[in-house]
Amino acid sequence: MRQLKAVSLGLAAAMLFVALPAWAQGAAAAPTVNKGDTAWMMTSTLLVLMMIVPGLALFYGGLTRSKNMLSTMTQIGAVACLAMLIWVMWGYSEAFGDGGGAIISGFGKAFLRGITPDSTAATFTAGVAIPEYVFVCFQMTFAAITVALVLGSVVERIKFSAVMVFGSVWLTIVYFPIAHMVWASGGVFFKMGALDFAGGTVVHINAGVSALVAALILGKRIGYPTERIVPHSLTMTGIGTGLLWVGWFGFNAGSALEANGSAGLAMINTFVATASAGLFWMLAERLNGHKGSALGFCSGIVAGLVAVTPAAGNSGPFGAIVLGAIASIVCFYAVSFLKPRLGYDDALDAFGVHGIGGMIGAIGTGIVYAMSLGGPGKPDFDMGHQLVVQLETVGTTIVWAAVGTAIAIYAAKLVTGLRVSADVEREGLDLGEHGERAYDH
């Protein structure tokens, strides 16, 4: 009997010894790459690229005069390409590298050092990851479209060379730090609990405020506001609007980093907030004595998309509808009344839609997040505290973007002269800057 017990104990000890390495591996197991999430994130990345070219290029291009169509599209495409190259050289490391700084990460991953096909990036679910290269690409498209959005205020008079110098400096001192502060685990506002699902502060307030500062420094277009300056092709703008809306699902639902319920919530909110905003802008036009216009519809669509960006996964559908409607109406008045009264020449209303809409969305997210309003917040959600955090994040973004943009614009002016000559501006930047025409007539 004693021998049997000894054998039993020996077998048990042996089994425990064999199992120990497995337990140790389980405790320190690397996150598992989910192929479904990876496929969704690769798709989302391409959808955001579609937002830039052709989406934003056609949207902005159609809003300009025909003599500046190609220059507008070329500036957007070229600065987006520049952003992609800078991103892999130092932008990704500055925003999302290994460092845990409050303002920037550091440069340990410059030129994507240390990243391999086996490297992973965490998602919002413990133990689930996507390939780091996919995360690098996804965030790269955000940087590319944000710097392109800024150009909406300065088209039709800024040099192509100035755009490239400005983009290089602005990305480095404005976009990358704000992206780190809000989205990286070491960032100051991430640690404070700021809610920005897909870029209300990082993308839209950042771009909108920068657009206003750039326009003020650059000066008004010749003939503004006394001459009639109108969009040359609302058809192109309408096509661009549709491409932006479709691409925005990659922007918003993709920011869940997984193909899950959070992405589904962001998807439905991107539908209904946008639909609400498109109709409410036209309603605002009617209430102010105008006909509901195609331009108003397109503007409302973009205002809704902007406002729902920070709230995409942080709001219930009805909260998103209200947020879209409010943002659309406020943006309408900012574009139609505030801009003419103050006299600044924000050519394509980058500040009036992205800046103002982004502020409404970022602050409003602190309200619609509440469970009592249909949001995904916990029962103990403290709305007052969250609104303080949102306001601090918005305020910092406004100041940081304004100061950084002034530096970047003056750097571009020092190097390139910044603005085209009066003759080139009158002739059009298509011919003056690129030697070609958009249309053969």
Image (cartoon, helix red, strand yellow):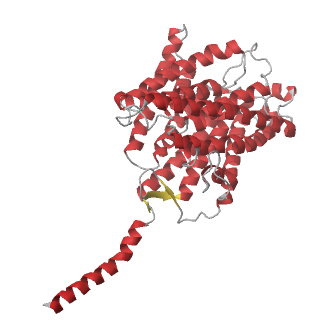
Most extreme residue toward the left, as rendered? 1
- Between 304 and 314, the residue placed more toward the observer is 314
Q: Quadrant of residue 358?
A: top right
Q: Residue at x 80, y 38 (%)?
A: 162
- Between 200 and 184, the residue placed more toward the observer is 184
Residue 51 visible somewhere in the drawing: yes
Q: Position of residue 148 (x, y in %)?
A: 66, 38
Most extreme residue toward the bottom, as rendered? 3
Q: Residue at x 35, y 30 (%)?
A: 374
Q: Is residue 325 left or right of residue 174?
A: left
Q: Quadrant of residue 370?
A: top left
Q: Residue at x 45, y 45 (%)?
A: 256
Is 363 situated above or below 44? above
Is 133 situated above or below 331? below
Q: Position of residue 131 (x, y in %)?
A: 51, 59
Is 48 situated above or below 90? above
- Tell me the quadrant of the picture where the C terminus can be found: top right
Q: Position of residue 327 (x, y in %)?
A: 52, 23
- Tell me the quadrant of the picture where the N terminus can be found: bottom left
Residue 365 visible somewhere in the drawing: no
Q: Is residue 295 left or right of residue 339?
A: left
Report how many numbered discs are placed on residues in the image: 0
- Between 358 and 80, the residue placed more toward the observer is 358
Most extreme residue toward the front, as rendered? 2
Q: Quadrant of residue 181?
A: top right
- Between 302 and 146, the residue placed more toward the observer is 146
Q: Residue at x 74, y 15 (%)?
A: 225
